[in-house]
Image (spheres, rainbow, N blue to C red):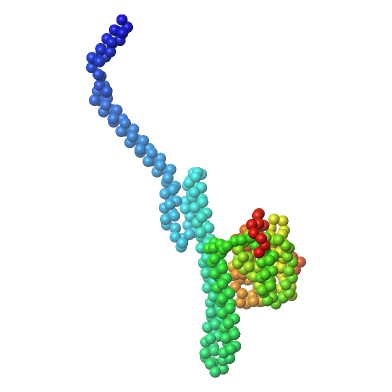
Amino acid sequence: MALLCVCATLLLLLAAPSPPLYGSAAVLAGFIGGSLLLIVATAFGTYWMMSTTLRPVRAISGKLATIRPSNLSERVPLPSHDDEFRELARATNQALERAQAAIQEQLRFASDTSHDLRNPLAAMRTEIEESLMRREETDWAETADRLLDSVERLQELVSNLLEISRLDAGVVGHHDFLNLGVLVAGELDHRQSKVRVVRRFSSGVMVYGERIGLTRLLNNLMDNAERHARSTVRVTVEHRGDAAVLEVYDDGNGVPPEQREVIFERFARLQEARAKDAGGSGLGLPIARQIAEDHGGTLTVEDSPSGARFVARFPRPTALGSPDR
């Protein structure tokens, strides 16, 4: 009986007409229209929301598009809300400030360089013109000696400028584990100093660095010390705490405390330095400090009973992968 009832029910369902999917055409049209209206409203709301949110980005990019090297003093606008876009604008302005400072530094450097290059060239031109005007009276051997002095000064200046360009460009030479005492002793053996050089070296003072750069640093410090020393220059290499230290001390007049940072500015020369060597360029100490910093170290002028004491500190390598050099 139950089976019969089930079969009858199935027959009735199959025989009955299927109802339409939608009640009527009006209901279907309303459903489609409502869906389209909802989609349009959602799209418009999304567009408005994104436009409002990204308006600060458009303002920043629009301002950046108008900034040129000639107007780096301009800055992008800061959004009113303190959010990520305000941080982006602030970081952009900081980058513009650094770019402006770098360009101004390069302009000053170019101006100072052109001035220092003109001086020896002008001296050479004057010497040659005066000699040609008095051909019969001119001692050409003596004239050549004077011209050679100007050429050597020009050569030194060009060499310093090339070194500065290399350092500014971040050109890194081959680094290796070096015995600082051995390197310094080797260079001092090849120098012909006009003053007495006293050495005090500790053994096993290792650094990880570039041999050419460290040699240039030492020679620049020695040139400066010999220029100002009365009779003696002391060179020390030793460990002090976690640092490998190179110290060059002269018994001259020293550097006033308020001038100890000035002397590391490019082309800066104190009055005493000009009096002792009118042909100097004022680039030796800035190059030495930049080399020390490129090795992760420092170069400073520190207190001393008399004279000037230049101290270069380098981080000691954590592991020595090669024997003494």
Location of residue 113 by image quarter? bottom right
Specify whether 9 is left or right of 316: left
* Residue 107 point in image, percent of width and height: 51, 67
Q: Residue at image x 47%, y 53%?
A: 76
Q: Write the residue at 25% across / 19% down.
A: 19
In this view, which residue lies farthest toward the right? Answer: 305
Residue appearing at x 25%, y 25% in the figure = 26
Whether residue 137 is visible to the viewer of this picture, yes or no, is: yes
Which residue reaches farthest front?
Answer: 323
Q: Tell which of 51 and 265 is nearer to you.
A: 265
Residue 264 seen in the figure? no
The answer to whether 72 appears left or right of 48 in the picture is right
* Quarter that holds the N terminus: top left
Measured as percent of width and height from the top left, residue 158 is found at 55, 73
Question: Where on the picture, by quarter, is residue 14?
Answer: top left
Q: Between 89 and 117, which is closer to the camera in this rendering?
A: 117
Q: In the rendering, at what x and y percent does residue 264 appear?
A: 62, 66
Nearer to the camera, 270 or 191: 191
Q: Residue at x 61, y 77 (%)?
A: 279
The answer to whether residue 24 is above or below residue 277 is above
Q: Which quadrant is home to the C terminus?
A: bottom right
Q: Is residue 39 left or right of residue 172?
A: left
